[in-house]
Amino acid sequence: MTSLMLRVTEVAPLTPLVTRFRFEHPEGAALPLFSGGAHVVVEMPDEGTLRRNAYSLISDPLDGSGYGIAVRREDGGRGGSRYMHSHVAVGDMLRVTAPVNLFGLDLRARRHVLIAGGIGITPMLSQLRQLDRLQLPYELHYAARSRSEAAGLKLLPEAPQIHVHISEEGNRMDPGAILSGQPLGTHVYTCGPEGLIAAVEDAAGRLGWPGGALHSEAFLAPPPGKPFDVTLARSGVTITVGAHQSLLEALEAAGVKIPWSCRGGACGQCESAVLSCKGRIEHNDHWLSDDDRAAQAKIMPCVSRFQGEELILER
Amino acid sequence: MTIRFNDETFRDDYTFHNSPAAIRRFPFPFDQDSYMYSVNMEPHQGGPEGSPFEKRFDVDEHYVSEMRDREITLADDPLRCQSLPHMELAGWDLLELIMVSKAEDYPELFSLNRDGDQWHWINRPLGIEQRFTFLDPTTLPCGPMEYITRQAQGDFAVLDQREGNLWMDAGMVTSQADWSLDFDIGMNFFEWHAPVPKAHEMGVFQRALKFLMNIRQGAPSRRLNWTMTVNPRLDTSPENYHKWGPEKRTVTPENVGRKQHLRVELQTFWRLPRSNALAFPIRCYLISLQDLATVPKWGRRLHRVLRDLPDELADYKGFAVNRPVIVDYLSQFDDGAATSPGIFPDD
Amino acid sequence: MTQSTFSPSILSRPVYAVLDSHGATPALMLADAEGAAALIELAERDASVMEHAHLIFIPGGADYGARLRALGPRMYREGPSYAAILPRFRKALADAQMGLRLYLAGTEGLIGQATAEALAAGLPADAIQAEHRGSIARRMQCVHCKGVTENVSTDPFTCSHCGLTLFVRDHFSRRLGAFQGVCVDAETPGIVPPTQEIQP
């Protein structure tokens, strides 16, 4: 996993909950360029726990002078966003992976419709820049509860194709209205809470849209759960996965090398074979098929958990 | 490092030849005495000095003549280079990758000067000098992918990554082993590989696709593929099959060592930054059986591989009709001795 | 005539299924000859599929016109050939909005061409369904001269453009809506395998 030690050059609160960070190369070298919708994974050494969180890039994909991310502080989360907000200052050095894109634009599209809920606006900020540069038709709909919470307002340009829906002001976003009347060749990208993604899919279904024109990114954090044991077949070692620790993190802490990319259940890189499962795997990912889940012969360690007597992985 | 470029042909009078140095550095693809499909990927991060794995885009003594052969093929059939409309950004990504790599890896042959988006490219072996504005297609004589691949050895497929699959949406294909870009353009990974026997049941393509989809910037991979060709012909396209096909039947026990060639593809895979597309260069190396057998380990091993290959594979790779003559010829180089693991010559 | 069954083949060979209704959402329907029966059966399973349907039929000698009209599609048109109805088909695609479903039924030639046209107009691939009925004759592109020979039912066959004798491959291009034909006697000029009927 290619990564660089980058220097934090800006820490700018946008709203009480959302802060923008900028990273630059310590020697001023150009950073790898990317495509709209890409993310990086930031490593946070938090007192003995190595945290790794994926953050969408909000900066211009063709600007290699630095990377921008916007982090929403999740007080009920596992600690990564709190670490960013309370421990990271200008001048600090953090390890940041090269950009990876699991939420790219379909450049064949005749029209792009971007739908963002809350912090889901972040990947669309880099997508917007790409669309503007390529001069492709688009419209963006940004839903937030209140103006004070809408961090994206500070980052979005003013343009007629950008629509802000503040629910507190009685202006709720209506996916059905947005989707109806769109010409053939329109692609829709949704990022935000699971409920928003489901609402867009529902509306699309009712209008007869097929699934291929819909794209979504859910910011999935590894959910906590009861601690459980897992045995590694290659070494015979059994380790315990803590309540607020993901299986992937537990394996890494035990020195097991596992390929990973998104750390959020979407890319399939960490897929691991299950040699024995006496119990139930809690599949929290978006990668495995229904058949794979039922068979319980595979697990995605980044977000999934286990309850039962025995889980043996081929690692 | 100076390279003496051959003046040779890959059609008609076939004056192609490998120097002794080219023979020694040939990318022999078999690391053991038998062959079956595998994903067989490794990181493309350098290799032994002087080997075809060392540089990002290997340039060898055949460079100038190969580019001339490409020009002839394209003049006759422009459909060998196509790019669907949404792939232009990927074409620029590829142009940057090749120009930057070549200028850094072969500074005595290529120069690239960049002042913002004003670029100045010099290709000494081909006598080309070009000033242009990066991302502005009106400043180049043709599209960016075509422009740079007319100056780089091997075929190039540029794959769009979307819908959980890879799509062959652009390419420059003039030295292919018998597939048609014009027919296959727009197909996805499984579709364009559909004609390959056995590999689909083995799940090879499922694993390969997953691996390729996760290739990241700055971390290219490579693998070797192989087939057999009669005469050192680069353009073995289906389009011209009725022209080169008859040559296959001219192999005899007397000429097989000279006429029959092992054709190896060094395939590399690169994530492109601005488009998120995957570049897939397919670099073709040819060697006659008689030249190959001057390396004792390779003579022994190739005999065993071809003797024991399943019929389906020999059929698919198109040399089944000449297989008995080939295996018979190679048997003289196989004394049954053990061969060392790995692809490189001994000593 | 019931839905055709094709034997398992390579992955690029298109696979067809029985049409599945998406209810009363806007629909474009195209059928030739025996394909009409597939549309009739679709409407029998769900009559609402015709409410917002624009149905175009190429009879090719098959007498289904009256029965199709009786299904009550919002618009109905007959045309003598694919080439003749193509302008109307293109206009319908140009005017369409996302949500449109395309139902194709009949020969592979019709399905292949109509699919390629729709994809080029921006219709997503998963908005297109195709059920095969009737002749299994193929559209074949000659890889050498690029000409397409229609209604090929034998293997090998003669390219109607350049005259080469070509063998029939199952390798199919969605973009061209045709299978690939390759010179059968390149290595042995004049020596051609016996002609056989193409089997499903």
Image (cartoon, rainbow, N blue to C red):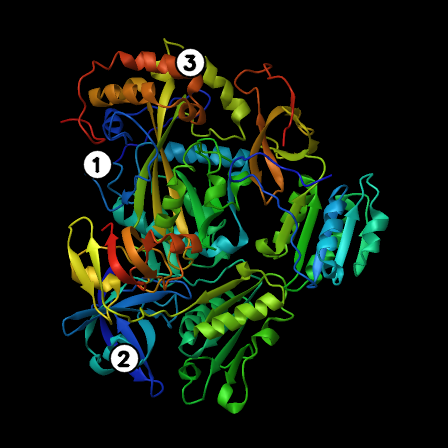
Q: Residue C6, percent across and down?
A: 61, 36
Question: What residue is disc 1 on?
Answer: B50
In the image as oriented, which residue stretches furthest toward the top?
B254
SS at badge 2: strand
Chain letter of mark 2 equals A
Q: Relative to A167, is A207 on the left or the right?
A: right
Question: What residue is disc 2 on?
Answer: A10
Chain letter of mark 1 equals B
The residue that appears at 71% across and 58% down in the rendered structure is: C46
Q: Relative to A133, is C136 on the left or the right?
A: right
Q: Relative to A92, is B117 on the left or the right?
A: right
Question: What residue is disc 3 on?
Answer: B251
**Residue type at the position of mark 1:** Gly
**Residue type at the position of mark 2:** Glu
Residue B127's mark?
none
**Residue type at the position of mark 3:** Val
Q: Relative to A285, is C128 on the left or the right?
A: right
Chain letter of mark 3 equals B
Q: The N terminus of chain B is located in which quarter? A: top left
- The front one of C188 and A261 is A261
The residue that appears at 45% across and 51% down in the rendered structure is: B165
Q: Separation of disc 2 and disc 3 at Cα?
A: 70 Å
SS at badge 3: loop
Q: Mark 1 packing: few (<14 Cα in 10 Å), some, or many (20+)?
A: some
SS at badge 1: loop
